[in-house]
DNA sequence: TCTGGGGTCCTAGGACCC
DNA sequence: TCTGGGGTCCTAGGACCC
């Protein structure tokens, strides 16, 4: 059995922990730049506000006081997430953290009675110890556990935990689940399925295997298998990432080459820092640019350039210099850019990097590694006190709008101590 | 005026090989 | 007019997730 633990309206719940006055109110959390809605309280969902709604469309509701907006505060959410996860990890032999607000608990070999005790306990413990409400879905496969957790979340009668542990319950649950709510069926697939007469998860699960395979190939078969109660989704998520991306939208569009170059340098330096944090090195550095896709009155351009490094690297100097070279090949001054980013790919373990035998300046590499080490130490406060001249004077998150930002309630103290 | 960021996996098709 | 067949590997783009 799997238990999927899902934090309810996670970002909103995090804000509520430190502002109890938000309880019972219609609240939304906004993306970077206060651009669009990324989390909603039940009350704001009930008002019809959709995920991804641009903020300007609901600004009047905020002004008139019927809706409260919070800028996103990912430092806070990350900290509360790790507190929740450590409580979950302590309760079961094995946990797979699936996202910032979700984890699968592996309950294999346990009696249902025991599972029920653990789950009930976790709902109240996480609420009491961290202040975050969670819902739990229990079922024989991950996809069914997701279905179960939706019921747990939607109907208070379940008191936070829903079990799909018999075939009867499975069929009932699937018949009440719209196909678009199924894990793995997204916005492109669900309209297509509906045209084929598939309205609910049960409609899909009842189609013959061969038809599913022909129409929806491997990923369709996987979902179909899981809905029918047999494991189709693999066990473990890899512990190390395979690519790392740092990107931001700009508050205002720009064509300024120097401005964009320094932004890209910031993103590249941030990627290098993330690489070092998980002891990885990148074999490839890519840069991408976007014009404003919502402005159909303006010419559109969204290039991407990749630079292959002769030797996998993670120093700020090397990653930034590769990113700048890539940028030079795609930058065109006649466009107005709204967003840029850097992706590092082909990651390898940093202490197993292949060094060429000939034509390689080992001394330079050692110096760069040493410089990175010192930079990381000095910058461990989170403020970029030491940076390359190519970077901007601030940090890569500077210049983005966040008019409704909460404080770093749970991490600010650590920061002050470290700076001292 | 104003529309996020960061990942994974899969597939089709091209390049290349014999 | 007419131009093999069958593999593998890589990559870009598209789908999905939160």
Image (spheres, coloured by chain):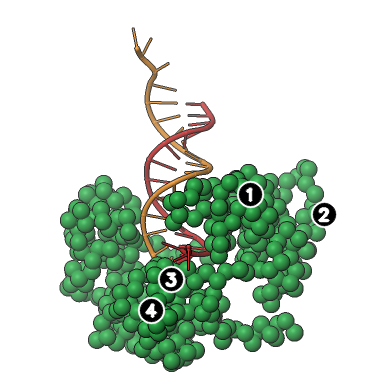
Chain colours: A green, B red, C orange
Residue A149: where, in percent of width, then height?
31, 76
Give the mark, 1 or 4, whose residue is nearer the N terminus. Answer: 4
The residue drawn where x is 46% and y is 73% is: A30
| Chain under numbered label 1 | A
Distance between mark 1 and mark 4 Cα atoms: 41 Å
Callout 2 secondary element = helix
**Mark 1 and mark 3 residues within 8 Å of each other at the beta carbon:** no
Distance between mark 1 and mark 2 Cα atoms: 28 Å
Distance between mark 1 and mark 3 Cα atoms: 31 Å
Question: Would you place residue A100 above or below residue A326 in this image?
Answer: below
Give the mark, 3 or 2, whose residue is nearer the N terminus. Answer: 3
Question: Would you place residue A200 above or below residue A158 in this image?
Answer: above
Q: 10 Å neighbourhood of mark 2: few (<14), some, or many (≥20)? A: few
Callout 3 secondary element = helix
> Which label is found at residue A363?
2
Q: Which residue is mark 4?
A: A61
> Which label is found at residue A327?
1
**Mark nearer the viewer, 1 or 4:** 4
**Mark nearer the viewer, 1 or 2:** 1
| Chain under numbered label 4 | A
**Mark nearer the viewer, 4 or 3:** 4
> Which label is found at residue A55?
3
Residues at marks 4 and 3 on the same chain:
yes
Residues at marks 1 and 3 on the same chain:
yes
**Nearer to the camera, A29 or A305:** A29
| Chain under numbered label 2 | A
């Amino acid at each position: 059995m799997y238990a999927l633990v899902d934090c309810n309206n996670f970002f909103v719940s995090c804000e509520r922990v430190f502002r109890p006055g938000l309880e019972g109110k219609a609240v939304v959390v906004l993306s970077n730049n206060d651009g669009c809605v990324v989390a909603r309280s039940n009350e704001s969902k009930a008002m019809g506000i959709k995920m991804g709604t641009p903020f300007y469309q609901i600004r009047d509701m905020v002004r008139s006081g019927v809706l409260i907006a919070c800028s996103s505060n990912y430092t806070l959410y990350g900290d509360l997430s790790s507190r929740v996860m450590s409580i979950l990890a302590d309760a079961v032999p094995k946990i797979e953290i699936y996202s910032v607000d979700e984890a699968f608990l592996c309950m294999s070999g346990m009696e249902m009675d025991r599972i029920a005790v653990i789950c009930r306990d976790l709902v109240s413990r996480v609420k009491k110890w961290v202040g975050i409400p969670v819902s739990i879905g229990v079922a024989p496969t991950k996809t069914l556990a997701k279905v179960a957790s939706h019921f747990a979340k939607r109907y208070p009668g379940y008191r936070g935990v829903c079990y799909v542990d018999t075939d009867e319950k499975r069929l009932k649950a699937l018949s009440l689940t719209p196909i678009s709510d199924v894990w793995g069926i997204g916005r492109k697939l669900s309209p297509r399925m509906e045209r084929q007469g598939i309205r609910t998860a049960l409609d899909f699960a009842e189609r013959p295997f061969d038809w599913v395979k022909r129409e929806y190939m491997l990923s369709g078969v996987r979902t179909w298998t899981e809905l029918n109660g047999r494991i189709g989704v693999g066990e473990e998520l890899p512990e190390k990432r395979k690519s790392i991306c740092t990107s931001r939208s700009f508050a205002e569009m720009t064509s300024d080459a120097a401005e964009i170059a320094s932004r890209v340098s910031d993103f590249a330096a941030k990627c290098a820092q993330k690489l070092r944090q998980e002891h990885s090195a990148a074999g490839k550095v890519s840069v991408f640019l976007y014009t404003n896709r919502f402005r159909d009155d303006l010419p559109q351009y969204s290039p991407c350039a990749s630079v292959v490094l002769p030797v996998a690297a993670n120093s700020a100097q090397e990653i930034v210099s590769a990113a700048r070279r890539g940028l030079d090949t795609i930058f065109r001054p006649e466009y107005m850019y709204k967003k840029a980013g850097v992706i590092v790919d082909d990651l390898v373990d940093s202490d197993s990097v292949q060094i060429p035998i000939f034509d390689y300046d080992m001394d330079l590499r050692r110096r760069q590694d040493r410089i990175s080490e010192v930079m990381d130490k000095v910058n461990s406060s989170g403020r970029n006190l030491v940076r390359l001249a190519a970077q901007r004077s601030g940090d890569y998150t500077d210049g983005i709008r966040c008019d409704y930002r909460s404080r770093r309630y749970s991490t600010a103290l650590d920061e002050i101590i470290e700076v001292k």
